[in-house]
Amino acid sequence: MALDYRNSRTPEAEVDSMFIDRWSPRAFSDKPLTDCQLAGLFEAARWAPSCYNEQPWLFIYAIKPKDRERFLEALVPGNQVWARRAPVLMFALARRRFQSNDKDNRHAAFDTGAAWMSIALQARRLGLHAHAMAGFSRQKAYKILNVPENDYDILAAIAVGQRCEPSVLSKEVAAQEKPNQRQPLVNVFAEGQFKKLV
Ligand SMILES: Cc1cc2nc3c(=O)[nH]c(=O)nc-3n(C[C@H](O)[C@H](O)[C@H](O)COP(=O)(O)O)c2cc1C
């Protein structure tokens, strides 16, 4: 297949709309999730594939105001300003070693990424959005969550909720409230062998 060098969309490729409908908003309504919605997110993550079916992820979540306040403390200010409205905050952790033999699991982050994407896609199915964040203090997160650093890598924070009007955000943050573009396929797929990015 000839990959299009110019366009960020390949016109002949049809993908399920769920992939296009997922994006990362910042304007969240503070409406809590129902137990059923929350369970749906968890269940979606549970079915993600993983190396040796190890399921090395651990999602620590906050829905109670007190817990959300605690989780927020670990986020950088630029994320705190919008994530504080989200009714669910999570941290995605990956277990560093296989449970079966205690050897290093080099694929734990890959697997946890798959589980996060399942959450993000299931969120859209439920009329919700999920927004991942790398902008947090790892040191604070380990402390706040009481996580043994030798055993788990804290990979990302995640906000989940229902999207609302961008007017709840400051002007600067509201200006970012749109789906992002993507690189053309030719930059991220290479046939047969390695190809340096131009
Ligand atoms: C691991 C990871 C870390 C991210 N960190 C942040 C962050 O700290 N703050 C933020 O506002 N967005 C963050 N994002 C969101 C990305 O900017 C966003 O996914 C990307 O621009 C693509 O846009 P889309 O998700 O709307 O399609 C992060 C996303 C991922 C997957």
Image (spheres, helix red, strand yellow):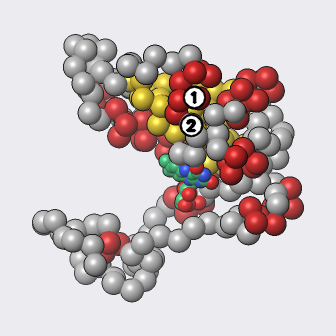
Residue beneath the point at 80% across and 34% down: 32
Residue beneath the point at 71% across and 54% down: 26
Please name the amino acid that badge 1 sits on: Ala
The one of 136 and 101 positioned closer to us in this rendering: 136
The outermost residue toward the left is 192
Residue 144 lies in quadrant: top right
Residue 47 lies in quadrant: top left
> Label 2: which residue?
137
Residue beneath the point at 79% across and 23% down: 66
Residue beneath the point at 73% across and 69% down: 175
- Is there CB contact under 8 Å for labels 1 and 2? yes
Residue 140 lies in quadrant: top right
Q: Residues within 10 Å of mark 2 (few under 14, many from 20)?
A: few
The outermost residue toward the bottom is 6
Look at the numbered disc 1 and give the secondary structure of its residue.
helix
Please name the amino acid that badge 2 sits on: Ser
> Label 1: which residue?
141
**In the displayed structure, would residue 198 be above or below residue 145?**
below
The x, y position of residue 112, in whole percent, is 42, 35
Q: Quadrant of the C terminus?
A: bottom left
The x, y position of residue 191, in whole percent, is 18, 69
Q: In which quarter of the image is the N terminus?
A: bottom left
The x, y position of residue 107, in whole percent, is 29, 35
